[in-house]
Amino acid sequence: MQLDLQFRPASYWDHAGPLAAILNGIKGQNRRRMVAGFVTGQAPESLGPLHHGLVADRLDERTRKELGGLHPSWMGGEYLPDYLPGEVEIARIVLASVTQDVISVRARRRLGRGRIRYRIVDEYHEPGRPDWVCRPASSARPLTLAQLIALIEHAGDPDRAACDSLTDRIRDDQCSSDPETVAAFLRVESDFYPSLPAWFDRRAAEWLARRRRELEEGDDDAA
């Protein structure tokens, strides 16, 4: 499938539909899936009605701990920083860690005018910790698909220097010896860029092919 790297959404504040608008404000990854199931009628009837508190941007601490008690993956996304006024999420990286950590790419425009400003946040934000480095930090219009990919891949992790590929580095940091498992360790999602997941799926396939070659070459050297 040919991807249109010059695709640019008309606006980050015009959602594709009511469901996309609801889900965009929900930080928790599992809550997003659950709410989507209720809204689309795919949730089991045995679950009963959806509690309105589960649609909130931010859960109260009690509910957050209760969900985390079901399984650690329910914590994924719930500890992201709160949205700034007028801020929306334009993409997220979801890690297959025990707690399903999420890295969120966000955009905001002050008072509905001026340049669009970007920031990247994760679930380990604390006072005094450096911010993620975004390039570009702002733009006059929404980013093209190619520009968003570059912003994500060249993002500066607060704990490490910027690199050529953030997603490759995340995979390289995994200790598993199974390349297929590591290749699937992360996925990238977006409500505004439908082709973004496909691009990063290709990136994962390229990483996997490269890692297999490295392992084969290592076996040949050891023989």
Image: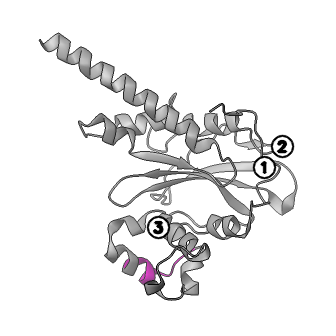
Q: Earlier in the sequence, mark 1 or mark 2?
A: 1
Q: Quadrant of the N terminus?
A: top right
x and y, in percent, of residue 89 in the image: 65, 57
Q: Which residue is mark 2?
A: 140
Q: CA distance from mark 3 to mark 1?
A: 29 Å
Tell me if residue 62 is in the magenta stretch. Answer: yes
Whether 174 is drawn above or below 10: the answer is: above
Whether 162 is drawn above or below 25: the answer is: above
Query: Mark on residue 116?
Result: 1
Q: Which residue is mark 3?
A: 30
The three-letter amino acid code for the residue at tag 3 is Asn
The three-letter amino acid code for the residue at tag 2 is Ala
Residue at point 50% right, 32% down?
A: 203
The secondary structure making up most of the magenta span is helix
Q: Is residue 145 left or right of residue 130?
A: right
Q: CA distance from mark 1 to mark 2?
A: 6 Å
The three-letter amino acid code for the residue at tag 1 is Ile
For the record, the magenta segment spans: 58-65
Q: Earlier in the sequence, mark 2 or mark 3?
A: 3
Q: Nearer the viewer, mark 2 or mark 3?
A: 3
Q: Nearer the viewer, mark 3 or mark 1?
A: 3
Q: Quadrant of residue 213?
A: top left
Q: Secondary structure at mark 1?
A: strand
